[in-house]
Each structure stands twice: as structure tokens, then as C-alpha cells.
């Protein structure tokens, strides 16, 4: 998120490959099985929340059964324009074209009737930005409409530097990551953000409503091929830490300089923990 509170197309493009590489298999597989065994008839109605430039839809479309009709929602009209251009040519897992519409909307105004006739609601890299209240409202809406949810790439707070796969995180890193976690809980437009509490909040909200959960880690493992993303993250974390702990600027500069050079030279890798969750209303696979 930049200073204006928006996400740039270039940042979303930079992270797309790492996001796709990170995805957990089990929740995706369960989502595909859920669609395939629905008693309602295709085309499946899929709703992607906080779509940005459509990276989640590009990942999911060829891995899910069809026919698929997608609605992509975001408050950023420019990102939706990119999404439309890049997602319209997509095909489902059987090679059939998809239908796709975009909707510019503030997700704060998420109303239960958004999920009317929706089979599967999806979101990636969104739920650490939202509040606990918002997650409860989403789970309520899914329960009312017996809609499944595939919520991916929610940060979980397990962040590490690694050298040859060994943990190289020290006390200063731990302090910086704790400062970052506090910054992630700041209001991102939905009230106090869940930040690293998002995976647990999602599991609790859907679990309490009787959903069956398939939950798995989906960490970024940023090695040499993802160096630009790792450096950009490091710079972003230092900026966030300066905002969160303005009296500790010297400590933050020292940390940033000490970590940036080895990261840039390929002597350090980065591990950033996320989780993917598929939640399905049980026990029946009722028709809509
Ligand atoms: C981290 S990006 C993830 C984008 C995309 N899902 C992906 O995986 O690349 C978060 C997205 O949520 C959108 N967003 C944030 N707050 C929003 C709000 N209040 N209403 C609608 N969209 C919002 C942003 O515009 C951005 O596209």
C-alpha cells in the first residue's frame, strides 16, 4: 500500500509470480471439488473481492471447472480496467472461455445480497487489510447464501531471513517485524485492520458458523529470482517502521542498511508466512 492508501499496478505485477508460486494446493483442490459437486447448474457464479488487476482470477480460472462467470469488485477503477483487459481472454480448466464483469465498489459497503446466487467468493491478499467485523459480516453472508469462500494469501506474521534455508533472523529483525505487525493493524479503510490475525479470525468466523475448513500455509519464499520483490518489501517495511516508531529512526536505518546489502547480493533469502483457507457450508452441497 502506498502513501495514498492505494495499490499500484506495478507493485501488484511485481508480486504476482511469488503469489502464484506460494499458493497452497489443498484449499484450491477442495474449491474445485466443491464446484464440481454442486447440484446447481453451471455456469458457476464466482465473486472476487479486492481484485486489483486480477491476479487472483488469473490464477484460479484455469484451475477451476467451468463454465465460469466472474464478477470482480474493487474500489480502484484503474486497476479494474487492467483486470478486465488481462482476464477477459482467460479460459477455464476445460479450455472454455469465461464471462467476466467488473464493479467499482467500496467493500466497506459489503451487503449480504452481494452473494445472492454466488457459488464461490474469493479474495487474495485482502483480508489482512480488513477488520474483524468485516470478516464476521462476510461469513454471515456466506452462511445465508450457502456460498463457499476461498480466501488466500492472508499474512500470518511468520517472517524470517534465511541463509541456505537456515533461519538467520536475529533480535533486531524480530523487533522490526513486531513494529511492522503493529503498523499492519492500523486502519486500512475498514477500521482496525486484522493484519497478522487475519488467518485466525477467518478460521474462527467461518468455523463458528459450521463451515468445513481446509486451511494451509502459502508462504512467499523469496530467493534470487524474486530479488526485486524482496528489496521492495524491505524498503516498504522500513518506511512502515519509521511511521510506527518515529523515535527509533536510527535503529531502523541501521537495520535497513545491515539487511539490504546481503539481500541485494543474494546472500539472504526472505520467508514471509501467509495462509490460504477454503470454507464450505456443510453438510449439504445444496443447490442455490
Ligand atoms: C493487496 S491488493 C490485492 C489485489 C489482488 N487481489 C491480488 O491478489 O493481486 C488489495 C486490493 O484491495 C483493494 N481494496 C482495498 N480497500 C478496498 C475497499 N475499501 N474497497 C474495495 N477495494 C479495496 C485495493 O484496491 C487492492 O486492489
Image (cartoon, grey):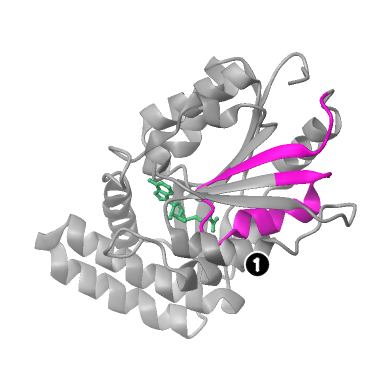
Residue 21 x %, y %: 67, 61
State the quadrant of the C terminus: top right
| Magenta stretch encompasses residue 138 | no
Q: Is residue 131 visible?
A: yes
Let me know if residue 57 is in the magenta part: yes
Q: Position of residue 209 (x, y in %)?
A: 56, 15
Please state the total of marks drawn on the protein image.
1
Q: Is residue 204 visible?
A: no
Residue drawn at 49 percent across, 78 percent down = 228
Position of 252 with respect to 131 (left or right) is left
Q: Dot 1: within a 10 Å radius of its alpha carbon, few (fewer than 14), some, or many (20 or more) residues?
A: some
Residue 28 on image: x %, y %: 73, 43
Q: Please, is residue 8 above or below residue 72 in the view? A: below
Q: Nearer the viewer, residue 166 or 60?
A: 60
User: Would you place residue 219 above or below residue 161 in this image?
Assistant: above
Image quarter where the N terminus lies is bottom left
Find the magenta span and give its range.
40-69
In the displayed structure, would residue 142 be above or below residue 265? above
Dividing the picture into quadrants, the one containing residue 275 is top right
The residue at the point 52 percent across, 78 percent down is 227
In the picture, measured across the screen, residue 213 lies left or right of residue 123, that is right
Please identify the residue farthest to the right as the structure is shown: 94
Q: Mark 1 points at which residue?
A: 86
> Callout 1: helix, strand or loop?
helix
Amino acid at each position: 500500500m502506498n502513501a495514498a492508501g492505494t495499490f499500484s499496478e506495478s507493485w501488484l505485477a511485481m508480486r504476482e509470480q511469488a503469489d502464484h508460486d506460494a499458493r497452497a494446493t489443498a484449499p484450491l483442490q477442495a474449491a474445485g471439488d466443491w464446484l464440481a459437486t454442486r447440484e446447481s447448474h453451471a455456469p458457476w457464479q464466482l465473486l472476487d473481492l479486492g481484485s486489483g488487476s486480477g491476479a487472483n482470477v488469473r490464477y484460479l480460472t484455469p484451475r477451476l471447472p467451468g463454465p465460469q462467470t466472474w464478477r470482480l469488485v474493487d474500489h480502484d477503477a484503474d486497476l479494474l480496467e487492467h483486470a478486465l483487459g488481462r482476464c477477459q481472454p482467460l479460459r477455464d480448466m476445460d479450455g472454455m472461455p469465461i464471462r467476466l464483469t467488473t464493479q467499482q465498489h467500496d467493500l466497506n459497503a459489503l451487503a449480504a445480497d452481494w452473494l445472492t446466487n454466488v457459488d464461490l467468493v474469493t479474495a487474495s491478499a485482502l483480508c489482512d487489510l480488513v477488520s474483524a467485523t468485516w470478516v464476521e459480516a462476510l461469513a454471515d453472508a456466506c452462511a445465508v447464501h450457502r456460498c463457499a469462500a476461498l480466501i488466500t494469501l492472508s499474512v500470518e506474521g511468520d517472517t524470517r531471513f534465511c541463509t541456505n534455508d537456515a533461519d538467520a533472523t536475529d533480535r533486531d529483525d524480530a523487533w522490526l517485524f513486531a513494529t511492522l505487525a503493529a503498523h499492519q493493524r492500523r486502519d486500512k479503510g475498514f477500521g482496525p485492520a486484522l493484519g497478522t490475525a487475519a488467518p485466525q479470525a477467518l478460521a474462527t468466523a467461518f468455523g463458528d458458523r459450521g463451515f468445513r475448513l481446509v486451511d494451509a500455509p502459502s508462504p512467499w519464499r523469496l530467493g534470487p529470482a524474486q530479488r526485486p520483490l524482496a528489496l521492495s518489501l524491505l524498503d516498504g517495511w522500513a518506511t512502515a517502521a519509521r511511521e510506527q516508531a518515529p523515535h527509533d529512526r536510527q535503529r531502523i536505518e541501521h537495520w535497513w542498511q545491515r539487511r539490504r546489502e546481503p539481500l541485494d547480493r543474494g546472500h539472504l533469502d526472505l520467508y514471509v508466512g501467509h495462509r490460504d483457507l477454503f470454507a464450505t457450508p456443510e453438510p449439504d452441497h445444496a443447490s442455490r
